[in-house]
Image (cartoon, grey):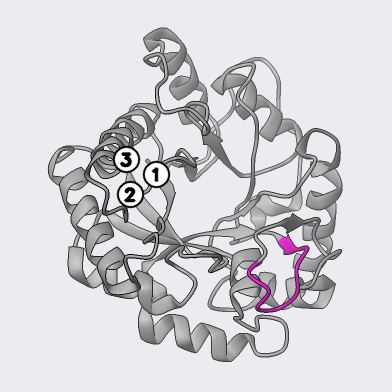
Amino acid sequence: MAKAPGVFSGGLCCLSNQSFNSPMPLGAHLPTSKGFAAALLNAQQLGLDCLQIFSKSPRQWNAAPLDAAKVADFRAKWEASNFTPLVAHDSYLINLAATNPEVREKSIAAMIDEVERADALGCDYLVTHCGAHLKSGEEVGMKMLAASLVEVLEKTPDLKVKIALENTAGQGTTLGGPFHHIGTVLKSVGSPRLSVCFDTCHAHAAGHDIVTDLESVLADFEANIGLHNLGVVHLNDSKGKLGGHLDRHEHIGEGGIGREGMRAILNHPKLKHLPFILETPEVDTKIADNIVMVRELQGA
């Protein structure tokens, strides 16, 4: 799915930006209300290098099948671009850690659909939340999550898209705040089709001090998950305080992580080669400002 640089064939050239010569691809989660190809064009005009999308509404269980002609058009334009990777995010409703049989079966079916849609679009990664154990206990939740992922993978054996488990803010009974939750599931499933997405806001909210002790956080990540499993970084500042478990994204440099915290993350030798995806608020009006800030901090 990764590709050599090319030229966008849609008649419009993308804006020049410094990232094409940078090892760090920068992207954003952009709306697809006008279609997948329109989201790619939007990303090009913003001077980005990669893209994250929803393949369907994240707040609904069901969706109409993908339009084959529109998918073909999007994939042709994507392949002709110099963009990589393409990332999808799954539905917020899915809970693969659920013990309730009805919820679990519905979540597995929805996840299989998400995997199939992401693969059809040519996505490299499908980001998913780890789910919540809903008071059944962390150990039970991790076992259910692992078993659900095994079933999803077994029922999509020929697909290439990787499922990236995202760390969480650790709110309520959600799994994925402590790194060992994700590491345990990865080891239990043991599939090369699993990867990890590291969200900076979630890490800060869960109590990982990426501002003043980034080295220790990365050492913890390496010990429990392995940095070789890290595929994508969600780059978000945090409205909440360190360890406050508030999952609320903030504009880059304006939250609890701040400019210097973001600068350290963007330029860290163990991270700076990875794709960074912005999920900052007010994407329609503020995304360009966040991109400018990242480019400034990245080059510092």
Residue marked by disc 1 = 124
Q: Quadrant of the C terminus?
A: bottom right
Is 47 in the magenta?
no
From the viewer's perspective, is residue 108 above or below residue 120? below
Above or below residue 35? Residue 251 is below
Instruction: Residue 48: give x, y in percent of width and height.
Output: 68, 43
For the N terminus, the image quarter is top left
- Residue 238 painted magenta: yes
Q: Residue at x 39, y 44 (%)?
A: 124
Q: Secondary structure at mark 3?
A: helix
Query: Relative to residue 190, is residue 99 drawn left or right?
Result: right
Residue 37, percent across and down?
57, 20
Q: Which of the two residues, 291 or 283, is positioned nearer the viewer here?
A: 283
- Going by the numbered disc 1, the residue's amino acid type is Asp
The residues colored magenta run 237-245
Mark 3 → mark 2, Cα distance in angstroms = 18 Å
Dividing the picture into quarters, in which one does residue 7 lie?
top right
Q: Residue under circle 3?
A: 107
Circle 3 residues within 10 Å: few <14, some 14–19, many ≥20: many
What residue sits right under mark 2 in the picture? 162
Q: Earlier in the sequence, mark 1 or mark 2?
A: 1
